[in-house]
Image (cartoon, helix red, strand yellow):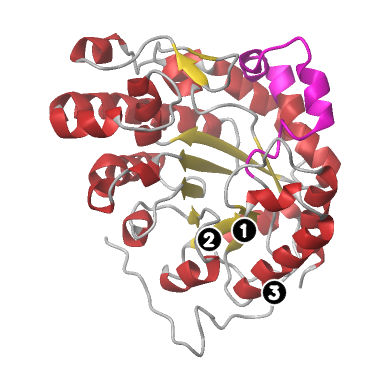
Amino acid sequence: MSVHLVSATASSPGIIPHPAPRRLSNRQRFLAACACEPLDRPPVWLMRQAGRALPEYRKLKEGRTFVELVRTPELAAEVTLQPIERFGFDAAILFSDILIVPEAMGQAYTFRESGGVEMDFSTHTSTDIARLDASNVAERLSYVADALALVRPRLAGNTALLGFAGSPWTLANYMIEGGSVREWNRARAMMYEQPLAFAALMEKITQAVIETLRLQIDAGVDAVQIFDSCGGVLPASQFEAGSGRWIREVIDALGRKVPVILFSKGTHGCWSTLANTGASAISLDWTVELSRVASILPKEIAVQGNLDPVLLTTRPDIVERETLGLLRSMRGRPGHIFNLGHGVLPTARLECIQALVDTVKSFT
């Protein structure tokens, strides 16, 4: 069934009458927000909250590669928990990477010394696609389930636990380009020039993403997020064919066992397509007005975001001011999960992150 966007009047932009909010644990608050239930305050977590900006992460990483951290359950669990112990976020997200999926299919990844990702090979032809094996992905990613098994008891049911995967379209971009690039062009070219090969690749990736998310759900995560980081490189007219339909296939296959958050960076003007994927929540980047988009999305779809990540590199008083402004703009719209419009920058200041958390938690 298609989802229709709603329009809000000027006098009540997206405001929905609701009963008095109730006070809940952090985990309950997060799940209630995903269900668009009224709350005492929005839950808060941050994309890329684990890692880079934290001194304890940098210390743990000394002498180790990023991939080693991801593939070692004890280390991945520790990194996942570090921001929870320091800041008390309402949700912990597993420390991992979207590229574990192509790696499990036979296309490994490493990080270049100059920055960015390098894949073992580029997926350009039908022969390259045939090399990829989407079977037994869960078996190859058993270290993910092992890490989650270590994290869950330490959260003690008080903090939500999130899993994630890259969208099929975003993974296809990395796999076709052979790594990270400044301009994402080759996947769009394949979609136009080699539609059969493109469809074969997307079907394989989609199945692997489904199995990866099922693995995490079976391991006990409370929700999952799909990162469609390359969604915005598609023309609006091609977003459904290139990304939307494959995301919808993933979400349909998961059977609504847990809430699914969809973050499609730069995908503006495709709100109805995003809503029709079946996602429980739509996460928005910092370049759009959150309250405006929230007012036109169906009231049963939650929204996540969308503070500008660069604010965390400034001063705590600035962060407090801008956080309050965003919170006030969303007051009266159940189903708001506070987050950034993208990931925490490596240069983010700890006192700014703390100011953000304190401001959200004290807001009523």
- Asked whether residue 41 is in view, the answer is no
Q: What residue type is labelled 2?
A: Val
Q: What is the C-alpha distance between the residues marked 1 and 3?
A: 15 Å
Name the secondary structure under disc 3. Answer: loop
Q: With respect to residue 13, does 189 lie above or below?
A: above
Query: Magenta part of the protein: which range?
Result: 47-76
Q: Which mark is residue 207?
A: none
Q: What is the C-alpha distance between the residues marked 3 and 2?
A: 18 Å
Q: What is the C-alpha distance between the residues marked 1 and 2?
A: 6 Å
Asked whether residue 61 is drawn in magenta, I would say yes
Residue holding disc 3: 21
Q: In which quarter of the image is residue 23?
A: bottom right
Query: x%, y% of residue 75?
Result: 73, 19
Asked whether residue 324 is drawn in magenta, I would say no
Side (left or right) of 202 relative to 194: right
Residue holding disc 1: 337
Residue at x 54%, y 81% (from the top left corner): 15
